[in-house]
Image (spheres, helix red, strand yellow):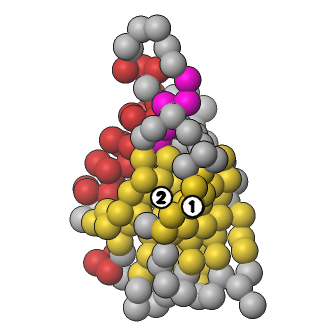
Amino acid sequence: MQEIIKVGMADLNIVKSPSILTTLGLGSCIGIALYDRQTKIAGLAHIMLPDSTQIKNNSNKAKFADTGIELLIEQMIQKGCSKSRLVAKIAGGSQMFSFGNNSDIMKIGYRNAVATKEVLSRNNISIISEDTGGNYGRTIELYSDTGKLKVKTIGHGVKDI
């Protein structure tokens, strides 16, 4: 039986096959799914903000793209993954609210996506698929037996990436 493990906001977790990782309500947040095909170990982080260096109280590393992804990679290596085999799939990064001005400071979803891509690139981890942007929320499920990422959206259906 496939156990389903929930990953909360500003949280991360790692499972081995056949367990499933899920996170609900990705709006401007990004879900980062990392997978090692050889070990069938999957990791999922639900990050809220792009950069921990801009925040005073940043004790929760999983909240930020820069520290959360590094922590996820580190924990997956401890479980037996090889960093060189890790691949990424990302989802989320919506612009949930419309603001009158076009200030980038308000574009948290976009900034989260950019920061996520930068951290993964710095770690030489390829993003093999993504479902980001738009103005709607997502719920995702990461299947550790196959590496499939199921993206569920209200009004936009369900798709596997």
Above or below for 144 versus 45: below
Mark with earlier residue (1, 2): 2
The residue under the point 46% across, 90% down is 39
Above or below for 101 versus 108: above
The residue under the point 59% across, 85% down is 16
Q: Nearer the viewer, residue 120 or 140?
A: 140
Q: Are marks 1 and 2 in contact (CB under 8 Å)?
A: no
Locate residue 158 relative to residue 37 in the image: left or right: right
Q: Is residue 63 visible?
A: no
Mark drawn on residue 25: none
Per the rendered image, the range of residues in magenta is 93-97
Q: Is residue 100 visible?
A: yes
How many numbered dots are placed on residues in this image?
Answer: 2
The residue under the point 39% across, 34% down is 111
Q: Is residue 86 magenta?
A: no
Q: To which residue does mark 2 refer?
A: 32
Looking at numbered disc 1 in the image, what kind of residue is underneath it?
Val
Residue 29 in the image: state x and y as whole percent: 54, 42
Above or below for 19 versus 67: below
Looking at numbered disc 2 in the image, what kind of residue is underneath it?
Ile
Residue 144 in the image: state x and y as whole percent: 55, 81
Name the quadrant of the C terminus. bottom left
The residue under the point 44% across, 76% down is 35
Q: To which residue does mark 1 refer?
A: 158
